[in-house]
DNA sequence: ACCTGAACACCGTTCAAGT
DNA sequence: ACCTGAACACCGTTCAAGT
């Protein structure tokens, strides 16, 4: 007869994310995650296909935490809110955040975030055939900064300096988006 | 009596880099590196303090490969050459390149590259008290793009698309540097 | 001084067995 | 159907021993 499972995939991912937050990515082992869940390591394989699948799941979990901006706001505020939300997630989960750069941006949650960015860029007046390129450049620059900050490359700088840097980066990108909007050569 | 060592740190790092290039970062194990060098794993510990030290050494090795631009060139060409050189290294060593974002930019080779960027920015007319901030923003955006490209987030796009994106990013950053040069508010 | 052999405490993953 | 126990082939690292 079928028994009810005692835990689901979400429970496994939450346990892994908690471990990463508290003790770093190296602490996310199948044995340690299983210990948190309260089962043997082998039981995890019913919920995750492999360790790599578990790590992919952590990235998805991070993306679900990025707050989506209210639909009625002007596009500047929407993009600003997404950037701020992404930065909060980076600060909350610095060990896992760098993995965002290592996975193709084609997962469910990636697509959701990207679709929201596309809508904001369209509203900003970026021509349809330029939206994808502009989004790649903007998201790449933002992620590059946040991963540098979370991953340690900029960790020796005081917080105020990083706040100001991030503000300047956002200003630069806002100017770029404006320059891609409206009339263009050709 | 003292014997002559049969291999040095550089030999260990080269073996590790070759393994990473051919089979990915996960293939860089102490046993595999030792196998390439032709010794037992334990012999490596005379040249590297730990596995983490070995990985740090790989990052340093990558940075030594970045071609330094000729000193006489205009600043635009110098920064362009550094960006192109960095991208070539990223293409040659995609498995190791993402580690660049995870180490504080304070190692010997990091400082050498940064000093060259500082000189170019000074020549561009960026005020001394703005040079460090401008360099952080520019290097962060470039590294973010290159790690995305090397690490797989953008790997599903054709090469031509990525070439064009990279060109646009460079143009944007050149404009940013120009805007930070010469007269500024205050 | 330099390298090895044996060993330790892990790690991800499999498979057959239990309920 | 779901979980466990035992096992396998690894992994980084130590320590004492060999030359």
Image: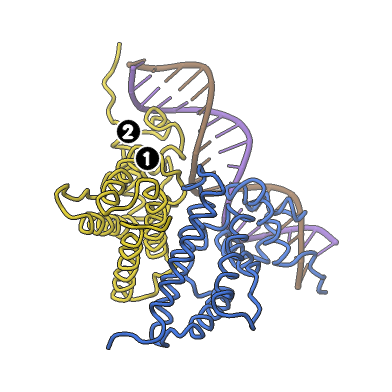
Chain colours: A yellow, B blue, C brown, D purple
Total marks shown come to: 2
Given this view, does label 2 or label 1 mark the residue nearer the observer? 1
Q: Nearer the viewer, residue B122 or A178?
A: A178
Left or right: where B102 falls relative to B116 = left
For disc 2, the chain is A
Q: Can residue A41 be seen at all in this image of the molecule?
A: yes
Q: Which mark is residue A57?
A: 1
Q: Can residue B102 be seen at all in this image of the molecule?
A: no
Q: Nearer the viewer, residue B137 or A43?
A: B137
> Residue D7: x and y, percent?
57, 29
Decide: few, some or many residues near mark 1? Use Cα within 10 Å; few <14, some 14-19, many ≥20. many
Q: Nearer the viewer, residue A130 or A46?
A: A130
Marks 2 and 1 close (CB-CB < 8 Å):
yes
Left or right: where B117 falls relative to A137 = right
> Residue B53: x and y, percent?
57, 64
Mark pair 2, 1: CA separation: 9 Å
Give the SS element for disc 2: helix
Give the labeled residue for mark 2.
A9
Left or right: where A50 falls relative to B82 = left
For disc 1, the chain is A
> Residue A97: x and y, percent?
37, 54
Residue at the (37%, 75%) spot, across then down: A157
Residue at the (64%, 82%) spot, across then down: B71
Return the residue found at the far top.
A1
């Amino acid at each position: 007869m079928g028994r009810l499972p005692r835990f689901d995939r979400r429970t496994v991912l939450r346990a892994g994310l908690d471990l990463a937050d508290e003790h770093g990515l190296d602490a996310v082992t199948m044995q340690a995650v299983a210990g948190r869940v309260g089962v043997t390591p082998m039981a995890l394989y019913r919920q995750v296909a492999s360790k790599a699948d578990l790590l992919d799941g952590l990235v998805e979990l991070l993306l679900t935490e990025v707050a989506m901006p209210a639909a009625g706001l002007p596009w500047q505020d929407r993009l600003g809110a997404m950037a701020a939300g992404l930065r909060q997630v980076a600060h909350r989960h610095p060990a896992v955040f760098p993995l965002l750069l290592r996975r193709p941006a084609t997962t469910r949650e990636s697509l959701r975030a990207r679709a929201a960015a596309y809508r904001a860029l369209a509203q900003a007046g970026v021509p349809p055939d330029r939206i994808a390129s502009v989004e790649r450049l903007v998201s790449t620059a933002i992620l590059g900064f946040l991963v540098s900050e979370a991953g340690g490359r900029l960790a020796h700088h005081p917080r105020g300096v990083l706040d100001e840097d991030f503000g300047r980066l956002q200003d630069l990108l806002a100017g770029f988006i404006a320059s891609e909007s409206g009339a263009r050569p050709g």
